[in-house]
Image: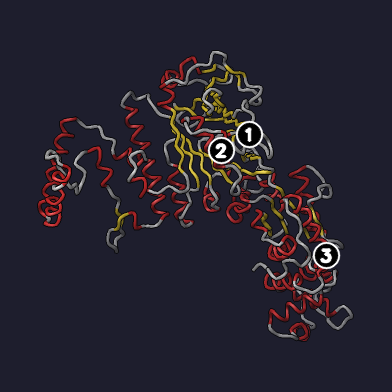
Amino acid sequence: MGILLTKIRISNFRSIESMSLDLGMSNLLIGQNNTGKSNFLRAINIAIAGATDVSENDIFVTAGELLEKTKIAVIDTMFQPIDINEKLVSGFSDFWTGVFTDTWITTHNTGNFVAIRTEIKLDPMEESYFINRRCIRQWGESAETAQLDPKKPLFNENMRKYLQSTYMDANRDIVNDMRNRKSYFGRVTSSYDISEERIRRIEEQLSSVNSMIIESIPALRQTKEKLAAISDTIGDASITVEIESLARRLSDLNKGMDIVMKDSNSASFPISQHGSGTRSWISFLTLSAFVDNQNEKIKKNGEEAEQYFMLTMEEPEAHLHPQAQRQLFSQINSFTGQKIISTHSSSIVAHSALADAIYFSKRDGRTSAVRYRTDANAPKQGKKTPDEKIVREVINTRADILFATAVVLCEGITEELALPVFFHEYFGCSPYSHGVSFIGIGGLNYKTYLSLIKDFEISWYIFSDGEQKAIKSVKSAVRAIFDKDYSTPDNVVILDNGNTYEQYLIQEGYSDIIIEAVCEYEDDDNYLDTYMEHKQGQERKKNMANKLGKGTIRDYTVSSGRTDALLDLCLENKTEYALPVAKKIIAQFDVAKRIPPKIETLLSLLSARIGIDRVAAGEDANEIIS
């Protein structure tokens, strides 16, 4: 039996004003940069391992707030017992009962737990911040309603010994670790359990080999003889100088160690000559070796003995290609202990369990986080559960949705390509610089995307064609996921009069610009006329005829023939013309028409969400995104 950190609650710590989360054995932190994931990981390590470097910078303050000396940061953690299958059980094992003792264990009718409050507060006498730990007897609904043990029991030595936590940042490097005895590599390579007699014999042999090397190489021997003159300089004949070609003491072996790698077709190279990705990877593997070594030592105290270990790690994907990222994540999953990993990798998200994901965001300087609310008992949709559909249709192809501050869902690739161009014209910057993702869902399957968006509380918008089928799909999805009519939320923009995107642009008077863009793209000034001559009288596909409200036989001799031909041409080449047409529209002389009205409505809604205003008309017209 073991234990698991099942709940954490944080108040007034760095960017986290208030947060409460349930944790599992594996936890994956996702979201944009600078949303507070690193702050969360630091809070975990302070609570479990303690820290001596806390300061006023760890206390949350709002903009313009003067930090009061009485304000404290609070990190509440709850540990519960689990069985060998990592399922919660009611009581702690004899071993963990001995570690925590009755002083810390709270007996509850739903199962025993140990809850610890870690406070970061100012010592007014020392004028410095310190850590204070207290026992929570009733967890409560919030930090304010939790009931603390008035006796203030001490955090005992067994708890310090058997509760371990480590933090690995994105800059980990085995080359640095090899020279640092306090690193996990240094600790595991200088850790040995052999008799003093054997140590003495090994060190005698090391000394003998060292002397043999020096005497065998003339340059080293001569250098040693010259260095001996230092005794004359200092005036102390008792001084001796030695050259150590390798460590003579077993405890210093790590200083001279190196790691070499080779494949079957190359020479061996020191790890320092390999890339950052490989060095980062090996640094993690040495930590894994250290934890296994620690567990073996603890088992010597008794078969029931065990150590709780929490791994908190930033960006395991750093410097690794997607396939290597997946392989590394598999190794992380086999790591002995509980894990909280932050990532910006779509490959790792796609390779992990959706139930492990925790989405981080920040608004007005405050970090918030929400765990995916998986429903294991949800009925299947066809042959798949809702979670399986999300993984298959969204995560495996568009996992970038989980790193967005706002998501705009549109029907197809045309809008996905064009809308970022108008965004750049409106705001003078790329949508990705503000975490806005435009996603063509490849049809009308809004429901699956909205389900994921809702569970992670991501801001969302819909830009939809005005066809009845499209409106019905939007209406059904919004009602099913949010239990409201699609016309109620102002984040749904529908094109008027049953129009497709192409029909809408033509209706708004952009025909000449579209024709000009198409002719430039095809490098033929008469391309539309040639198209009309070639296609006249030919049959349209049924779905195109339905979109146009026309017959299946093309007739470009009627009064609307040229418009009909332009629509046919655009619908047949949606992906090719989407970008050229959008760029041509924003480059026109009339700045008032550079953004079509419905698109302007969408962008004005986004303006409030991402907190930036529209640039002056035409201010950034020459900086068109590619």
* Image-quadrant location for residue 287: top left
Q: According to the image, label 3 marks what residue?
A: 499
Nearer-the-camera pick, 298 or 450: 298
Looking at the rendered structure, the kind of residue marked 3 is: Asn
Mark 2 vs mark 3: give the one in front. 2
Task: Tell me if label 2 and label 3 are in contact, CB under 8 Å.
Answer: no
Q: Position of residue 320 (x, y in %)?
A: 45, 55
- Upstream in the sequence, badge 1 or badge 2? 1
State how far apart marks 2 and 3 are (Cα).
Answer: 47 Å
* Image side of residue 105 versus residue 576, left or right: left
Which residue shows up at 33% across the image and 38% down it? 187
* Badge 1 amino acid: Met
**Which SS class for mark 3?**
loop
Residue at the right extreme of this rendering: 559
Q: Disc 2 designates what residue?
A: 40
Q: Are marks 3 and 1 in contact (CB under 8 Å)?
A: no
Image check: 354 left or right of 321?
A: right
Check if mark 1's residue and mark 2's residue have beta carbons within 8 Å. Answer: yes
Nearer to us: label 3 or label 1: 1
Q: Which residue is mark 1?
A: 19
Residue 278 vs residue 607, the one in the foreground:
607
- In terms of sequence position, does the residue under pointer 2 or pointer 3 come before the other? 2
For the C terminus, the image quarter is bottom right
Q: Position of residue 165 (x, y in %)?
A: 45, 34
